[in-house]
Amino acid sequence: MRGQSVDVTDEDAYLWLEDVEGADALAWVAERNAETLSALTRGPGFEAMRREVQEALDATDRIPYTVRRGAFLYDFWCDAAHPKGLWRRTTLEQYRKDAPEWEVLLDVDALGADEGVEWVWDGAQVRYPDYRRALVTLSRQGADAVVVREFDLGTRTFVPGGFEVGEAKTRIGWIDADHVYVGTDTGPGSLTDAGYPRTVRRWRRGTALAQAQPVFEAAAGDIAATGWRDPTPGFERDFVSRTRDFWHDELFLLAADDTPVRLDVPDDAGKYAWKRWLVVTPESPWLGHPAGSLLAFDFEAYLTGDRTASVLFAPDGRTALAGHSWTRHHLILETLSDVATRIEILTPGPGGQWARRPLADVAPLSSAGITDTDPEVGDEYFLDVDSFLQPSTLYRGEIGGATETLKQAPAHFDATGMTARQYFATSADGTRVPYFVVGPDGRPGPRPVLLYGYGGFRDLQTPRYSPVTGRAWLARGGTYAVANIRGGAEYGPAWHRAALRADRPRAFEDFAAVARDLTARGTTTPAQLGAVGASNGGLLMGAMLTRYPQLFGAIVAKVPLLDMLRFHKLLAGASWTGEYGDPDDEADRPHLRAISPYHQLAAGRPYPPLLLMTSTRDDRVHPAHARKTAARLRELGHRVHFYENTGGGHGGATDNAQAAFNQALAHTFLWQHLG
């Protein structure tokens, strides 16, 4: 029987669940958590899976990925003995060893115990060029809001009276030894409607933050303002930017008198200065160059009106830019062709010409990416290569010199008899949509399949080795699939724009097309097909639930975005109107209502089993999206599982133990309904 949806736009009975830490809301959460844990954790299979997943996450033989800062390679490491992690460093000579000697700089577990706060590491900016101090950022229980403290790398202690900022969504960076650019919450008017810094201030050591000199201000309706110093010797420059929405920003060169000089580059283009060049990645056709190009201009000549570009990359219908990294004398270019990775070296020459040659051959259905370079010093690079079934290998090389294998990650599940393949589904409008399938080779179907997708914000889905998916799903006989749907960037800007704003349903149609194709091939059946997505991927899962319930046997939506008429009023939601549209704009509201899973729920619909997972400490996507959807489904007579972790932030977990628990919960739910 087809149900009737009820309008909850004006009369939303569950607004009280938007009170993140309200007593009534938390009591409701506790009741739902108890129900879900009772249903999913009591069997012996749950604990075995949780243990296996955590063992992989805590494995001491996994690769410790590093970044170079001067003479040292820095790493942040978590394991069973250090669940919140160690910030540490070593030398290249030591790093080459199977068991390097590490100098521990900061023990986050010990810090949290001393201060009585569940601190979660959020990174550090080491000061260039002396590398003696760092700006360390720490998050309380994994939230996006952080505290900032200055850290002395010699004494391995926080600096008394140094730069320190209280909890906020702060943006901060070094200018020199005694100055930083900072944007943070300094009182009324200092934040945008989205909750990010509205002002950029130059803060001098030894003075109060409130006395820091304002140098730039964005509008309240913008997302954020940011300032930074380019310390490259011979090219020292200061910049500020105004991010108008998620996909539009303005870049300014800060003159000696702090006058911002706007660079005449399209607002929707990526843009930055690198030594003598202005580097631009246009998202729309510009100056005769197609969207998705990578262009380099002479910076000083550009300021005087010269628009002569060196074309470093030009896309075609199948090839897109995936990333690029600088060394001292070269550019390393990463591209995708039908989601297959290619890596080249580009070298500037006379007359604006750039020579190019391959850096490395990448096996089919594998991914390769540059994890680090040290462009101020030399042409060193670190290259990581993996695939769905092959763990990572980390290489180190110097352009023009030898390449060495530094680290090889161990296998965390038995992939014997498994293969990975790429297929193409045909979406509703005829578009070919690539997707990957990983599972048993030659075993007759149908069988349980777990399909993952995201479909937004230019996100790329490339082949990756996942110990979690391997142990919790593949090793137990499941097949795993990844859909490269529109909204991502697998084919460049056009692939993203095809599902932008009112066109978001194209992403939904693509995912549904992949689901149908998996069934048509005999790989699975609707009853054995599960779907999982997080954040914007949680919106995708909500669309599958309400638009295509007949295609799936179970759905998991993690930290999901589901109320598309109020998302802009909840936490960081105002920053996403560039992706989805503005609910307060009458031109956007109809399509936002149409894609809002919360507003499309109805009684009497045959929804597949659903697990909603969120976090009380998620200060990016409000937990009310999942809370209200669960409450509404219950009201309409549908069964739904709901679990809210009290910590974890948008990642859902603050350490490997929480992550393993969450993964075991989701996969136990899937196996209960699909296995």
Image (spheres, helix red, strand yellow):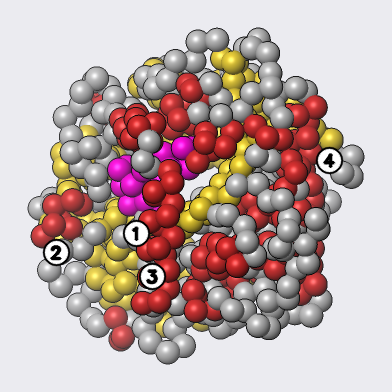
**Cα–Cα gap, marks 4 and 2:** 54 Å
Q: Amino acid at mark 4?
A: Ser
**Is disc 3 in contact with disc 2, using a CB cutoff of under 8 Å?**
no
**Cα–Cα gap, marks 3 and 2:** 26 Å
Residue 34 lies, in percent from the top left, at 38, 56
Judge the density around disc 4: few (<14), some (14-19), many (≥20) Cα neighbours within 10 Å. Answer: many
Q: Is residue 568 above or below residue 213?
A: above
Residue 47 in view of the camera: yes
Where is residue 484, by image quadrant? top right
The N terminus sits in image quarter: bottom right
Describe residue 297's horizontal placement relative to residue 318 as left or right.
left
Residue linked to disc 3 = 26
Q: Amino acid at mark 1?
A: Gly
The C terminus sits in image quarter: top right
Describe residue 322's horizontal placement relative to residue 78 as left or right.
right
**Is disc 3 in contact with disc 1, using a CB cutoff of under 8 Å?**
no
Judge the density around disc 3: few (<14), some (14-19), many (≥20) Cα neighbours within 10 Å. Answer: some
**Cα–Cα gap, marks 1 and 4:** 39 Å
- The magenta stretch spans residue 657: yes
Q: Which mark is residue 427?
A: 4
Q: Give the structural element (helix, strand or loop) at label 4.
A: loop
Residue linked to disc 2 = 115
Judge the density around disc 1: few (<14), some (14-19), many (≥20) Cα neighbours within 10 Å. Answer: many
**Is disc 2 in contact with disc 1, using a CB cutoff of under 8 Å?**
no
Q: Amino acid at mark 2?
A: Glu
Residue linked to disc 1 = 647
Residue 375 in view of the camera: no
Q: Give the structural element (helix, strand or loop) at label 1.
A: loop
Residue range of the region highlighted in magenta in the rendering:
652-668
Q: Residue at x 81, y 58 (%)?
A: 2
- Residue closer to the observer: 23 or 183: 23
